[in-house]
Amino acid sequence: MNNKLIEAINISKIYGRGVDTSVTALDNVSLEIHEGEFIAIMGASGSGKSTLMNILGCLDKPTGGTLIQDNVEVSKLGDEELAAVRNKKIGFVFQSFNLLARTNALENVELPLLYSDRSNITDLAQKALDSVGLSDRMHHLPNELSGGQQQRVAIARALVNDPEIVFADEPTGNLDSRSGMEIMSLLQKLNAQGRTIVVVTHEKDIAQYAGRIIQITDGKITSDKKNINKISAEETMATMTETEAAHENR
């Protein structure tokens, strides 16, 4: 088994106070994430999957339980220490891309590096954009890019600090089917290169591209299994193209 990156032990998250006003978003959740895994955390809206991602990604603190990353109990860290962990070890991709509208692709990817002590930030940002196939779009503004290209910029931004793990929250939610397949194909390629990827999704079809699927329902993990029927986004996209071509030739 590869190195253990994250261990969550009996994690709970409760919003509000009092018996009548509190809401339990996570209820004694325990799991491990190992280096090189591609995991899908799947659940319906309100199931607690995004709350779990926020805690695993050090964006939020649990109400109870223990979260360990690289043998450090991060659940006890302060806000500034958590920010340092996020900046150095974790990359995030969100459904809405979260790109600055008046800033080109290269400058958007450079943003996480502005808080580091690195001097070659432009070179690193260019390399990240090249890794997602957008080296020819680096000087374009977000509104000059398609939705799929904007998400690729967001992925490049998540990669630029060379994080240990990338969390993607509904990364295909704002994309058409083809663009969504392209993004999942890219995530699969990054995983094949050794990146640890965790995708949060409510779509069964998207979860099938991961090697391990964790199902969460009402704040509890109800299933955590290796996906023996894992499919390739690239192959799915190729089949889609063939089908479209066949229709056009009729």
Image: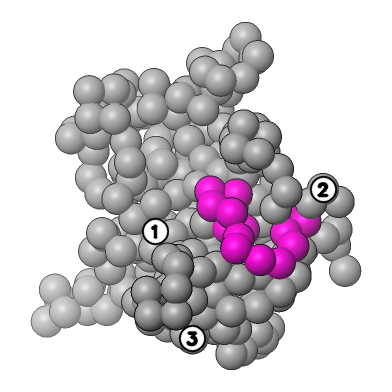
Task: Identify the secondary structure beneath mark 1.
Answer: loop
Please tell me the numbered disc located at residue 217: 3
Residues in magenta, as a range: 55-70
Q: Amino acid at mark 2?
A: Val
- The verdict on residue 79 being magenta is no
Residue 26 sits in quarter: bottom right
Q: Residues within 10 Å of mark 1 (few under 14, many from 20)?
A: many
Residue 96, placed above or below residue 250:
above
Q: Residue at 66% of width from left, 66% of height from top?
A: 64
Q: Nearer the viewer, residue 73 or 155?
A: 73
**Tag nearer the camera, 3 or 1:** 3
The amino acid type found where label 1 is placed reads Pro
Mark 2: few/some/many CA within 10 Å (<14, 14-19, 20+): few
Residue that appears at 29% across and 50% down: 96
Q: Nearer the viewer, residue 219 or 173?
A: 219
- Mark 1 or mark 2: name the one nearer the start of the chain: 2
Q: Position of residue 249 (x, y in %)?
A: 15, 76
Label 1 vs label 2, nearer the camera: 2
The residue labelled by disc 1 is 171
Mark 2, residue position: 72
Q: Residue 55's quadrant in the figure?
A: bottom right
From mark 2 to mark 3, how far is it between C-alphas? 28 Å
- Residue 244 vertical placement versus 125 (above, below): below
Which circle's residue, 2 or 3, is located before the other in the chain? 2
Point out residue 63 in the picture as x, y percentages from the top left corner: 60, 63
Q: Is residue 2 visible?
A: yes
